Amino acid sequence: MAKHKLRQFAEIENFKNVFHHLQHTENIPEFKLKGKWNSTYFNNSNPLVLELGCGKGEYTLGLATNHPQKNFIGIDLKGNRIWRGAKTALETNLNNVAFLRTRIENIEFSFAPQEVEEIWITFPDPQPQIARIKKRLTSPRFLQHYRNIMKPGGSIHLKTDSELLCRYTLEIIAEQKLTLQQHSSDLYAELSSRIPEVQKSYPTETFSIQTFYEKKFSEKGFKICYIRFSL
């Protein structure tokens, strides 16, 4: 297993669609592509969308496939996870997707103000311990990071099997007087209702793309929560 990970780390160092910004000091330098992702890497002016904590990149790849008119960047700290998504993107010539290894709390050093159109947070660690509330990806601390890089009115999407994180996020949205655009506490029950108005109201990617963990949770009968809001 250790040799396998070492091989993956060695490979992604040469992947043209993987970038690294891993400094741990307080004086983190700005990333070379900050404010230039579209002009320098993607070579277009399409909307830029991030997936935070992308893992193996299933959702990032699904979004990029469904929306060739947008650019997508999957962000995660674990190189062995990113390896799978990046390799698949290269093998399938999916050119509107890239991956960035960095800490989510440092994204302001990698993206310029108003550079990002949308953010997806798919099945993050709910950080259930009270002492770890600030580590929840929808906590005020992280929302401020997103606010500093997103365009006004840009959407944040959350999918989770955690009732705790779902409830917490709704509370934060209310407390901060943010705009709640959409919410379902049992997404697939609503989508299976066969009511056309309900089904059409959700972006296709909320149900047509599933991560490994989402499939696992759904098969076990866990309800899937979906929230879309803007800052």
Image (cartoon, rainbow, N blue to C red):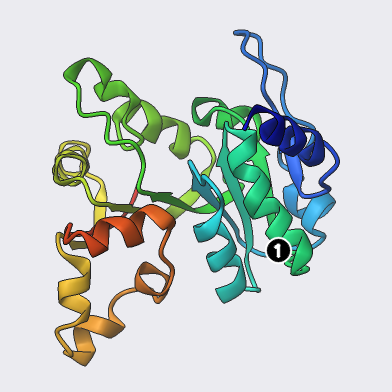
Q: Secondary structure at mark 1?
A: loop
Which amino acid lies under the numbered mark 1 shown in the image of this protein? Asn
Q: Residue 59, how many percent across, how many down? A: 50, 59
| Res. 179 in view | yes
Nearest to the observer: residue 192 or residue 139:
192
Quarter-of-image position of residue 88: bottom right
- Left/right placement of residue 20 relative to residue 194 reads right
Q: Which residue is mark 1?
A: 96
Q: Is 154 above or below relative to 208? A: above
Quadrant occupied by the N terminus: top right
Q: Residue 11, how many percent across, how many down? A: 80, 40
At x 69% / y 27%, what residue is drawn?
A: 21
Q: Residue 24, how many percent across, how many down? A: 62, 13
At x 58% / y 30%, what residue is drawn?
A: 108
Nearest to the observer: residue 83 or residue 44:
83
- Check disc 1: other Cα within 10 Å, few if <14, some if 14-19, many if 20+: many
- Left/right placement of residue 25 relative to residue 123 reads right
Q: Report the label total.
A: 1
